[in-house]
Amino acid sequence: MPSPKAKNNAGRSPNRTPSPHLLQRQGSDPTSARLRASESPTRRRGSGSASASATGPQQQLPEEDCMRLNPSFAGIALRSLLAIDLWMSKRLGVCAEEDSSWGSVRPLMKLIEISGHGIPWIAGTLYCMWKSDSAAGQEIMLNLLLALLLDVVLVGIVKALVRRRRPSHNRMDMFATFSVDRYSFPSGHATRAAMGARFLLTHLVLAAPVRVLVLLWAVLVGLSRVMLGRHNVTDVAFGFFMGYFQYSLVEALWVSTASLQKLLGVLG
């Protein structure tokens, strides 16, 4: 005889729908299904791409790096000119060392270097001004002295502002150097040679051969700076340009002997 429990189990329909409470317990309600769908891999991939796009702008290159990657035409041209300048200066530095290709000419180049140094020029100008008997001669030597002092000041200021190092193949065995002489731009010898040559050719009565020698001396002073490895080509070129126009400034500020005597009388 079957038991009442067996009868109850046999009486149940096999396709009977579970109760809502059972569905809720099993987590099969529609809300749970939507929550699980929202956590699907597709949604996770979408959220990952969204977060990547949100942090994307933070991974961009800085502005200065973009400028380096996209240089201007002027920057490219300047770098090319500097590269050519360094290459030419290296090739022309044939007297930089004793064992260089023109090392035997190095003593002569150093003698020309001393002839364009500021100390011999200032000392020679003071001596000529002291030995001069005429007021006109003293006036010329006085203005030459002021021009040399102006050259020292202007070249020192430009060197301190630019601070371009001397060529790597240079030997610091120059005559009577100062603190700013560790910088290369512009060449003080070139400025002094250009200004001094123009001054002498203008205010001194010289024969034609002597005038040629003065111009040749100025060119040799500038050439010796590159051959000894003291300066780059652009240092000397700008030095000639600067010295040429320094003389124009000296002419504009010319001090006569009468003006100097009045100034000394006021100060006295």
Image: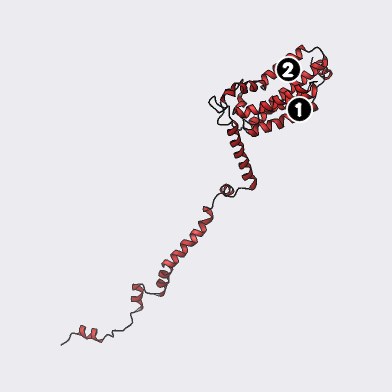
| Res 232 quadrant in image | top right
Q: Position of residue 184 (x, y in %)?
A: 62, 30
In the depicted view, which residue is nearer to us: 17 or 114? 114
**Could you tell me which residue is drawn at 59 percent across and 23 percent down?**
105
Q: Mark 1 sits on what residue?
A: 247
User: Gap in Å between the C-alphas at discs 1 and 2?
Assistant: 16 Å
Q: Position of residue 134 (x, y in %)?
A: 82, 13
Q: Position of residue 219 (x, y in %)?
A: 69, 28
In the depicted view, which residue is nearer to us: 71 or 179? 71
Instruction: Tell me which numbered mark, 1 or 2, is placed earlier along the sequence.
Output: 2
Secondary structure beneath label 1: helix
Q: Position of residue 154 (x, y in %)?
A: 70, 28
Q: Which mark is residue 125?
A: 2
Secondary structure beneath label 2: helix
Please identify the quadrant where the N terminus is shown. bottom left
**Could you tell me which residue is drawn at 51 percent across and 53 percent down?**
59
- Tell me which amino acid carries mark 2: Thr
Left or right: residue 184 versus residue 48 is right
**Label 1 CA crowd tier, 10 Å (few <14, some 14–19, many 20+):** many
Q: Is residue 31 above or below residue 200?
A: below
Q: Which mark is residue 46?
A: none
- Considering every residue shown, the one lying at the far left of the view is 1
Left or right: residue 101 versus residue 45 is right
| Res 4 quadrant in image | bottom left
